Amino acid sequence: MDAEQTFLSGRVLALVTVALALGNFMEVLDTTIANVAVPHIAGDLGVSPTQATWVITSYAVANAISVLLSGWLAQRFGQVRVFVTAVLLFTTASWLCGMAPTFAVLLAFRVMQGAVSGLMVPLSQTLLLSSYPQKKQGIALAIWGMTIVVAPVLGPILGGWITDQFTWPWIFYINVPVGLGVAYLTHRLLAHRETPIRRSPVDTVGLSLIVVWVGALQILLDKGNELDWFDSPFIDILAVVAALGLALFIVWELTEAHPIVDLRLFLLRNFSAGTLSVSLGFAIFFGNVVLLPLWLQTQMGYTSTWAGLVVAPYGVLAFLLSPAVGRNLQRVDPRVFASVAFAIFAAASFWRAGFTPDADYRSLALPQLLQGAGIAMYFAPLMAISLGGLPPERMAFGSGLANFFRTTAGSFGASLVTTFWERREAVHHNQLIESIHPFSAQLPQTIGPLQQAGLTSQQALGQMSAALTHQSTLLAATDLFWASGWLFLLLIVSVWWAKGPFGGAPVGGH
């Protein structure tokens, strides 16, 4: 059956929504769940922790490449068929990752897992939207958006708990029953709604260029901070390859009769505005999602579980408000929702900038709770702006492109935030340390109370240095929270580049 079918309703729609949301959640969860297991993997498989991080990098590279291919594959083989096949291959790869006897085998299956996972995110979104009538598609986008923001936070919490309670292979094994259930339900309920197939020639040049420039870019982002960025010849080479590859890719795809990626979507004003806003917003948002737990674990003595629990409250208001936002997307200008979302993100960032070294759980979690209200108004409206009015044959291309830029922007955000945090910490530490050098007039009154408590001069200086490091990392974090707040406010302008009204053709409509 082609795209002219009726929409789903009732129990069938509910089951389809659960299946697609779970499939998307499982994929996004796997981007972060392995992070906390890296030391365990390194120890069990006899590699260094640095080598073990390729378990994360290889997945990210393969994922980023396949996201861009999702539109072409869906057009050539059908959206339902590609999604179900991707889920089954992802499930198989997950099981094989857990069974891997050596690190090389684990890496190979992790690449396989990433290569098919990139198809699951855009196609779960496309299939979900095509199952809902126009007036309820806002709810579909809200549900889908929730899985994007909740899964990365739950990943480290769940991964840490599983690794501690069982063994690291179980972070992969848990995908097996979920994946089989998602594949079964999706095929059973959506097979009769398969999209039309168009067998266009394979753009082998475009495919090759994608592998080159996306692979180089993703490795650069994952390894840049570890290798001190452009002080490393390896990073320099990756940057040149990524830049040249991207330039050639753009020229080729815009002149190719059957491009593997539909870059002409960026000629559509609303697609460009929505994709730009959601990507830049996600870069700042995800950078903060990485920064806060990192600071809590390295400086505040939090475990990965408790750091995750500090971040997690944003899911409360996001969960409660998302359905209401989705129901009102047809009545309220999505630019208004998105503008309010960025204003709330800014307020939460400015609130975090007031953190002190003795901040308790309540003080740390409350800004996260506020941010949840912004999340509810962020994903669904901006994706409605990006994808609204696209014809069915371009929907998978649009979703793939938008999600590629969002995930790549998230990688940029995480890399830049960790880099600037370290550099700002060094600046603040140097400024603070000036007051306690051996010839400082303030030194006696600074370390005097510590010596009176029984510490030697060297011990007192060491304790003071640790206290200054604690303070300087907080000052560096607050610098970034302030910068994030102002950047969120600036993004409100990008939202209004989109041109209303938005009540015309439905998302994925005909």
Image (cartoon, helix red, strand yellow):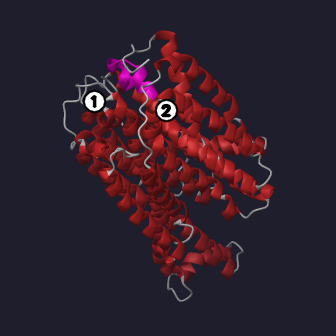
350 relative position to 114: left or right: left
Q: Nearer the viewer, residue 211 or 417?
A: 211
Which contiguous range is marked in magenta? 127-139
Circle 2 sits in a helix, a strand or a loop, which is it?
helix
Q: Residues within 10 Å of mark 1 (few under 14, many from 20)?
A: many
The overriding secondary structure of the stretch rendered in magenta is: helix
Q: Residue furthest top?
A: 10
Q: The residue under label 1 is which amino acid type?
A: Gly
The residue sitting at 30% across, 52% down in the picture is 255
Q: Residue furthest bottom?
A: 439
The residue sitting at 62% across, 50% down in the picture is 111
Residue position for label 2: 77
Across and down, in percent, residue 506 comes to 29, 24
Q: Nearer the viewer, residue 471 or 51?
A: 51
Q: Is residue 318 visible?
A: no
Across and down, in percent, residue 417 comes to 46, 59
Across and down, in percent, residue 100 comes to 77, 48
Task: Reply above or below: 447 against 312.
Answer: below
76 relative position to 222: left or right: left
Residue position for label 1: 389
Task: Reply above or below: 446 against 93.
Answer: below
Q: Which mark is residue 416?
A: none
Q: Quadrant for the C terminus, please.
A: top left
Q: The residue under label 2 is which amino acid type?
A: Phe
Q: Nearer the viewer, residue 457 or 257?
A: 257
